[in-house]
């Protein structure tokens, strides 16, 4: 038996134990401390589930901004007893561990880096043994569900189970909007194998006709079998779920699950540089400019995360591209909370093995230090505002948000540069490969 700590039994036992400890600690803190361990979002989830169990709409619960499917899943939390109330936390924690298992098996796959089990576990531990990940899931945040679906989506793509990948993509976008950005990178990566074609002699056919035929041929070639299956299965899943929910809950479903996010102005616990503007919009909506910036904030966010990054990088490294997309999406999002960091942390183990942050340790230490310290600066100002009643919006929170945003943009630049440099001179990477070094 290996003397290393990094064996499947030890790592996964440690991951489970970490979450069990946090779950029981949370029960004690909730029982004896005025500051509750359970996330306020979990109370929203469980209230909505209770309404559903009574035959009512989950949107009877004010601030429930999610698909009814989540409330359906959490119906057991409405049953009597502490265990059943904690059912959702347990489900989210289990999802964390399952996501870690997917990371482990992907990193060992030939398409994912062909790592030894020990080395794969070291990188999977970035997720599995991360106290931040365990804390967020055991407090009752549902991000663990999305994490397991995103990494399962990546697994399905690299194993060429395209129909399954489409179903997972459609389901994940229904549960939470942001995974739609992966559609572009996956579609772009699913290129048909290139075949050598002879150099044609100049034809007497008119140039315009040749170009027209060539354009039509390129369009048909683009929609190859894999791309067609992915698009069809994902859209069918997404549309079917939405039609079902709309048939049951009508307009409130559309408003709270999708449309609300275009104009949301959440400003509490929001690291975004939009934070101060959102606070002004919520406090005095009639006195703010008629130009609703919160409705336009998604334009640069989507342009970078769903268009530019996939086009530039997805044929070189799919997992790395998904990480860069998610990092950009979170950094440019008008609402940025700690839970959102899990969206890209789940993809970090695929990028780290050959990243500049590990090959140049001083760069990695600097990035981590700046990322943590600018968060701490913002949190200090937020503490002064929310607990001490001091007005710290300007310059405190505003400057803190700008500095944190600046660090995120710098880190994103390093990530993009790393992925862009992974393509060797031998040609494009094989479809579905998630680690560098394949050509």
Image (cartoon, rainbow, N blue to C red):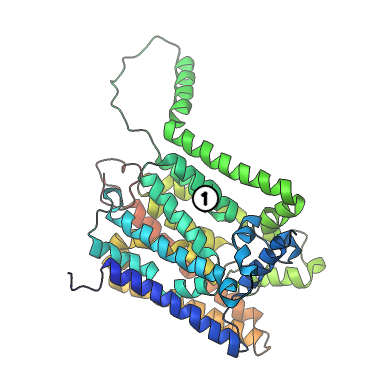
| Quadrant position of the C terminus in the picture | top left
Q: Left or right: where does residue 363 sit relative to residue 322?
A: left
Give residue 78's position: percent from left, percent from top. Answer: 65, 68
- Density class for disc 1 (Cα within 10 Å; few <14, some 14-19, many ≥20) is many
In the image, farthest residue toward the front: 80
Q: Left or right: where does residue 242 sit relative to residue 142?
A: right
Nearer the observer, 44 or 393: 44
Q: Would you place residue 38 above or below residue 29 in this image?
A: above
For the point 50% across and 83% down, the residue is: 25
For the point 46% across and 50% down, the residue is: 309
Give residue 373's position: percent from left, percent from top. Answer: 46, 80
Count of numbered tags: 1
Nearer the observer, 166 or 188: 166
Q: Would you place residue 321 above or below residue 5 in this image?
A: above
Q: Secondary structure at mark 1?
A: helix
In the image, farthest residue toward the right: 286
| Quadrant position of the N terminus in the picture | bottom left
The answer to whether residue 367 is visible is no
Give residue 306's position: percent from left, percent from top. Answer: 52, 49
Give residue 433's position: percent from left, percent from top. Answer: 33, 47
Nearer the observer, 32 or 252: 32
For the point 42% across and 35% down, the residue is: 226
Q: Quadrant of residue 9?
A: bottom left
Q: Left or right: where does residue 223 sit relative to residue 11?
A: right
The answer to whether residue 298 is visible is yes
Q: Left or right: where does residue 27 sit relative to residue 15?
A: right
Q: Which residue is mark 1?
A: 181
């Amino acid at each position: 038996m290996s003397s290393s700590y990094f064996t499947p039994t030890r790592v996964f036992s440690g991951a489970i134990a970490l979450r069990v400890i946090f779950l029981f600690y949370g029960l004690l803190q909730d029982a004896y401390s005025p500051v509750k361990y359970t996330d306020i979002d979990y109370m929203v989830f469980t209230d909505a589930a209770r309404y559903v169990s009574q035959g009512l709409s989950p949107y009877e619960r004010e601030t429930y901004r999610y698909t009814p499917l989540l409330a359906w899943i959490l119906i057991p939390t409405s049953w009597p007893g502490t265990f059943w109330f904690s059912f959702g936390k347990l489900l989210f924690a289990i999802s964390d561990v399952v996501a870690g298992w997917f990371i482990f098996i992907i990193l060992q796959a030939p398409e994912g880096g062909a790592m030894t089990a020990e080395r794969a576990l070291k990188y999977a531990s970035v997720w599995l043994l991360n106290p931040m990940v365990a804390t967020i899931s055991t407090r009752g945040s549902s991000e663990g569900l999305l994490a397991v679906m995103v990494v399962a989506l990546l697994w399905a793509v690299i194993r060429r189970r395209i129909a399954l990948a489409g179903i997972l993509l459609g389901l994940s976008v229904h549960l939470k909007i942001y995974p739609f950005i992966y559609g572009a990178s996956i579609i772009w990566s699913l290129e048909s194998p290139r075949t050598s074609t002879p150099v044609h002699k100049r034809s007497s056919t008119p140039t315009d006709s040749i170009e027209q035929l060539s354009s039509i041929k390129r369009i048909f070639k683009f929609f190859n079998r894999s791309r067609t299956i992915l698009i069809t299965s994902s859209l069918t899943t997404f549309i079917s779920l939405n039609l079902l929910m709309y048939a049951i809950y009508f307009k409130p479903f559309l408003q709270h699950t999708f449309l609300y996010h275009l104009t949301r102005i959440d400003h509490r616990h929001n690291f975004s540089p939009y934070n101060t503007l959102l606070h002004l919009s919520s406090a005095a909506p009639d006195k703010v400019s008629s130009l609703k910036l919160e409705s336009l904030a998604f334009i640069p966010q989507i342009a970078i995360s769903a268009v530019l990054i996939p086009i530039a990088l997805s044929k070189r490294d799919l997992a790395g591209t998904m990480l860069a997309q998610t990092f950009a999406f979170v950094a440019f999002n008008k609402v940025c909370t700690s839970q959102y960091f899990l969206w890209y942390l789940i993809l970090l183990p695929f990028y780290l093995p050959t990243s500049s942050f590990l090959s140049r340790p001083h760069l990695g230490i600097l990035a981590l230090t700046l990322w943590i310290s600018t968060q701490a600066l913002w949190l200090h100002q937020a503490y002064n505002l929310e607990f001490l009643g001091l007005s710290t919006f300007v310059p405190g929170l505003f400057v803190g948000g700008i500095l944190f945003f600046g660090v995120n943009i710098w880190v994103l630049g390093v990530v993009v540069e790393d992925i862009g440099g992974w393509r060797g001179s031998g040609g494009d990477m094989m479809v579905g490969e998630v680690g560098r070094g394949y050509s």
